[in-house]
Image (cartoon, rainbow, N blue to C red):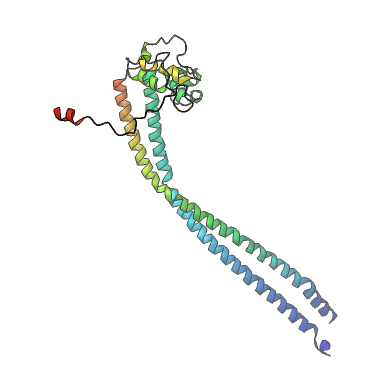
């Protein structure tokens, strides 16, 4: 009977606080992750939105091709009308 | 009496019940937190997937643009060196972009060791353009072995003197503009007839024509 009482005391004084302490640590860690994950999600969404302009690179590519073609035409003309240095 | 009714078995049951309650509370709370984490990660993964999809063709497009620009740079560098010569080309570029001579031309590694001539300090851009485009430009008459034609600090006048124009060589002394106003050294009396009715000619002279 005495050992049983001692076991009850250990259960209430030692085991229960330890269980509560450990579970509280797990819960605190889990809750601390939530804001970070939300921040990551918001940042990823913003990054994805910033890349919406990436499609305009195709327009830039086309314009660069046209510009370089124009420069090549002008260069060819200048090559004809201007004497070489040597 | 009540205390005596509680045995060690009852205390054990109560203790276990408390432990189970604590487990339930904390585990349910943890599950809710993990659910929020999962939801957030799903959103993040979706956005990251969009980023991957949107940025996939960027490399090819940028490589193409860089290739086109490289071709343009090669063309312009080659043309400039061909027409002006390597030394003058370095001077021209350094004149337009001071300090660029140190970088030199990409396709002409030896251009980095060339001491850039001070073309921009000698000629204005317009003069230089004329000199490059036509043999009849005024600068062509100047002696390139002579002193620097353009004063950097007062370059405007020096540049204008390059052109054979009388418009820029005014007579040394021109009559000064008259001073007017109440403080003028020469005061003129006001004429009375200014603003008065005009005199009429005699009718006979008008009629006799």
- In the displayed structure, B73 sits above or below A60; it is above
Left/right of residue B120 with respect to residue B22 in the rendered view: left
Asked whether the viewer can see residue B209, the reply is no
The picture places residue B7, in percent across and down from the top left corner, at 80, 85
- Using the image as rendered, state which of residue B57 and residue B123 is in the foreground: B123
Residue B8 quadrant: bottom right
Q: Is residue B18 above or below residue A63?
A: below
- In depth, the one of B90 and B171 nearer the eye is B171
Toward the right, the furthest residue is: A2
Look at 55% across and 63% down and name the residue there: B38
User: The N terminus of chain B is located in which quarter?
Assistant: bottom right
Q: Is residue B132 left or right of residue B23?
A: left
Q: Position of residue B42 (x, y in %)?
A: 51, 61
Image quadrant of residue B125? top left
Q: Is residue B39 visible?
A: yes
Residue at x 47%, y 55% (from the top left corner): B49
In the image, A6: left or right of A20? right
* Quadrant of res B80: top left
Residue at figure coordinates x 43%, y 45% from the top left:
B58
Location of residue B114 with respect to B62 vertically, above or below: above
Q: Position of residue B188 (x, y in %)?
A: 42, 24
Q: How many marks?
A: 0
Q: Position of residue B60 (x, y in %)?
A: 41, 42
View extreme (left): residue: B208
């Amino acid at each position: 009977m005495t050992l049983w009482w001692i076991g009850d005391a250990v259960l209430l004084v030692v085991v229960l606080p330890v269980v509560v302490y450990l579970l509280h640590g797990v819960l605190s860690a889990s809750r601390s992750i939530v804001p970070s994950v939300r921040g990551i999600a918001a940042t990823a969404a913003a990054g994805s939105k910033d890349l919406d302009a990436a499609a305009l690179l195709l327009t830039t590519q086309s314009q660069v091709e046209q510009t370089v073609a124009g420069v090549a035409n002008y260069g060819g003309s200048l090559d004809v009308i201007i004497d070489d240095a040597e | 009496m009540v205390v005596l009714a509680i045995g060690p078995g009852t205390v054990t049951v109560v203790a276990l019940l408390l432990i189970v309650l604590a487990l339930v509370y904390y585990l349910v709370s943890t599950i809710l937190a993990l659910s929020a984490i999962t939801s957030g990660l799903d959103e993040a993964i979706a956005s990251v997937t969009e980023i991957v999809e949107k940025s996939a063709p960027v490399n090819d497009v940028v490589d193409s643009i860089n290739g086109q620009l490289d071709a343009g740079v090669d063309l312009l560098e080659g043309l400039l060196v061909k027409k002006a010569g390597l030394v003058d080309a370095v001077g021209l570029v350094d004149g337009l972009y001071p300090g660029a001579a140190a970088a030199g031309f990409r396709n002409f590694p030896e251009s980095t060791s060339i001491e850039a001539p001070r073309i921009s300090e000698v000629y204005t851009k317009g003069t230089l353009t004329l000199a490059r485009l036509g043999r009849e430009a005024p600068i062509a008459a100047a002696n390139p072995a002579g002193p620097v034609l353009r004063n950097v600090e007062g370059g405007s006048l020096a540049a204008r003197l390059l052109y054979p124009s009388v418009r820029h060589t005014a007579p040394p002394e021109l009559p000064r503009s008259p001073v007017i106003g109440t403080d003028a050294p020469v005061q003129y009396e006001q004429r009375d007839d200014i603003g008065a009715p005009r005199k009429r000619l005699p009718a006979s002279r008008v009629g006799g024509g």
